[in-house]
Amino acid sequence: MFFSLDRRCGHVLDALAKYDDYVTIDSLSAQLGQTRRNTQYDLCKINDTFKLAGISTISSRRNRGIKLLDEQKTWWENLSLEGGRKFNYIFTQDERVALIICESLLSNEINTIEEMSEELKVSRNTVFLDMKIVKEKLNDYGIRFEYVSKSGYTVSGDGLKIRSVLMYFISAIYPLISDGIINFLSDPQVREHQSRLHKIEQELDVNYPAETIDKIAIMLMLTKREIPLNWERQEANIRENPVYRIVSRYYPSLSENDRIYVSIQLLGARLRDEANTPDGSIGNFKNMAGKLVAYFQRLVGIEIENKELLIFNLARHLNRSIYRYQYGLIDSCGVEEEIQANPKELFELVKLAAKEFSRDIGYPINDSEVAFLTIHFGAHMRKNNVAIGKIKVLLVVKEADPNGELEKKVDDEFPMFHVVRTVTPAELSAFQGEYQIVISTQLLKYDGFYAYISDRLEAEDKKKVLEVYLRYRMLKNENIGENLFENIKKYIPKENQGKVRMEINRYFLAPVPNLLQLLEKGNVQCIDKISNWRDALAQAALPLLENGNIETSYVDCMITDNEMYGCSTYLGNGVYLAHTQSRGNVKRSGVAVLTIKKGVNFGVNYKVRILLVVASTDKNEHFTVLKEAVKICTDENKVEKMLRCTKEEDLYRTIAEFSMES
């Protein structure tokens, strides 16, 4: 018998299996890095599976928590033998599409519909729909995916783009691979490649993350045919590099193109200095950055202040990052998960903008790269940028650096920093108090915020710097109100000091108007079906029209935006975020929600079941509400609970719960 469990349920069972005694749900949730509500939802699904398997449900004791019984542990261990999950994992559509792309791009013979149906455990009709999405996704990057009569599906296009897209989608499904749900890591070819890559690693005297080795090994296993690659100026440089010579020794039978590509993946960030252009030549990158900012503005519906500065900083970043997109490099900064989570909603919005932007440049942008873009947007849009400003950084190097090479690298990578000066360790004590963070290529005895890095500023160094920055930002946000009060309290009469302190902390720490404050009970609707997406937008916005929040032209603008730009604000999980930039047609801020039981098609690819309409008179409030909406609607469990509501009062109460949580 097969059992339907997802990855998160598997993680819950793995965690519980380690305990012999009871563990609280709060403790378990903290260990898993998810909310208590998500854990409770997972436990319900696990108990349903246990009932199906004919065994007892998870033991629960008041004030003690939960634990797995021996029979449950044995059952789970039996399903997890030999590195492969024996339960019937249900792939999402995105996961199916990513797997089809990975197995097709460099295959000699693409699987038939029947073979895919059996592998993915879905119907032939479902696979046909998946194949349409595969074709459209690949078309975004100029890759043709076509069906030829009697020959089956074929793939053609620029070889470098095909490689880049392959690495992108390997990264997309890597969590499933590492969990053993997709059993690539047990493939003998992959294990052989891992062995060779580790030997190369030892000869180079470097330590690659296991994930990097795994992804390169999987890429080599999936490469069944050779494709021409246009290296431009990189080919000669790579051939002269020692990494290429070592790769060639361990892979003599690989084509030269494949040896060069493996070398590029192993070089990673060290390829950068050969790939970028001088800052004086970034005109083209400014055009690219302008498009990215325009996508973001259209997405959030506000005009970014001083956007030319943001465009310039993004252009400098793209100048030094575009090669990573082109080559599909997979090494990461190491703290992208923390950046994605803090603030997650900004990361999700930047990711949506980057998705549109990636079509313009013809290469996908992975989550690690989106994390870096989020830093730039976040640094520019911080609420208290006037009070906080750029963070002052002191660089410490072994000896004088007249060309300021490290300073240039730090400026390029970290827009939130202002390097006040570069000094040697002997000069450090003379500059106390001029800076908040020290970045040093030398080991120091220093008690403040301090990152020890190499002078090359590689991926591991960036991780260290970002960790220090995140710790500093957290502490700074907590202390800013108190610091301001301490500076001004001597000018305030004693009897008023308590009131002033409370007002200052309220200004810096109190929540801004949020989604719940703008969502009235009468603005929530539940319907069974609707004929088309235009009617759905009009129906969703109807309460705001009737209440005088918006004029009819606001609805017309939302419809026009969708006609011109497509579903750029589709959040996934069947949720569409409907809004547009106010043109004097928003009279009072408001939010409306419409659920459609049977869904409605927005274009070919998107089946929308929840429509969220946001209209705001203030752009800061607008952006805050959007972030909160994204936070709720990108959580699959929350969306499912909203869709289970059949009455408006239940839907409103559910949204209110989620809004209070966020």
Image (spheres, rainbow, N blue to C red):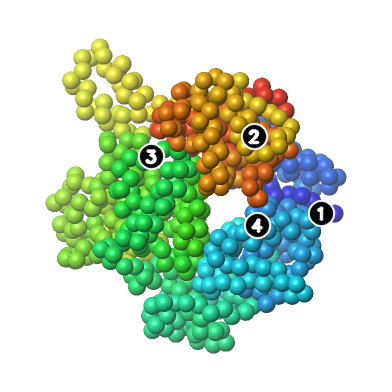
Residue tagged 1: 2
At label 1, which amino acid type do we have?
Phe
Instruction: Give whichever of discs 1 and 3 has the lower sequence position.
Output: 1
Secondary structure under tag 2 reads helix
Which of the two discs, 1 and 3, sits closer to the camera?
3
Count of residue discs: 4
Q: Dividing the picture into quarters, in which one does residue 651 lie? A: top right
Which of the two discs, 1 and 4, sits closer to the camera?
4
Q: For label 2, count other residues whose C-alpha is less than 10 Å away and answer few (under 14), some (14-19) or many (20+).
A: few
Q: CA distance from mark 2 to mark 4?
A: 25 Å
At label 3, which amino acid type do we have?
Glu
Dot label at residue 535: 2
Secondary structure under tag 3 reads loop
Left or right relative to 487: residue 356:
right
Left or right relative to 330: residue 541:
right
Which quarter of the rendering shows the N terminus? bottom right
What residue is at 74 percent from the left and 32 percent from the top?
528
At label 2, which amino acid type do we have?
Asp
Instruction: Give whichever of discs 2 and 1 has the lower sequence position.
Output: 1
What residue is at 68 percent from the left and 58 percent from the top?
132
Instruction: Give whichever of discs 1 and 4 has the lower sequence position.
Output: 1
Q: CA distance from mark 3 to mark 4?
A: 33 Å
How far across and down, in percent of the image, does residue 540 sit?
61, 30
Which of the two discs, 2 and 4, sits closer to the camera?
2
Please tell me which residue lies in front, 400 or 272: 272
Q: CA distance from mark 2 to mark 3?
A: 28 Å
How far across and down, in percent of the image, does residue 345 sit?
49, 41
Residue tagged 3: 303
The vertical placement of 137 against 41, above or below, is below
Residue tagged 4: 133
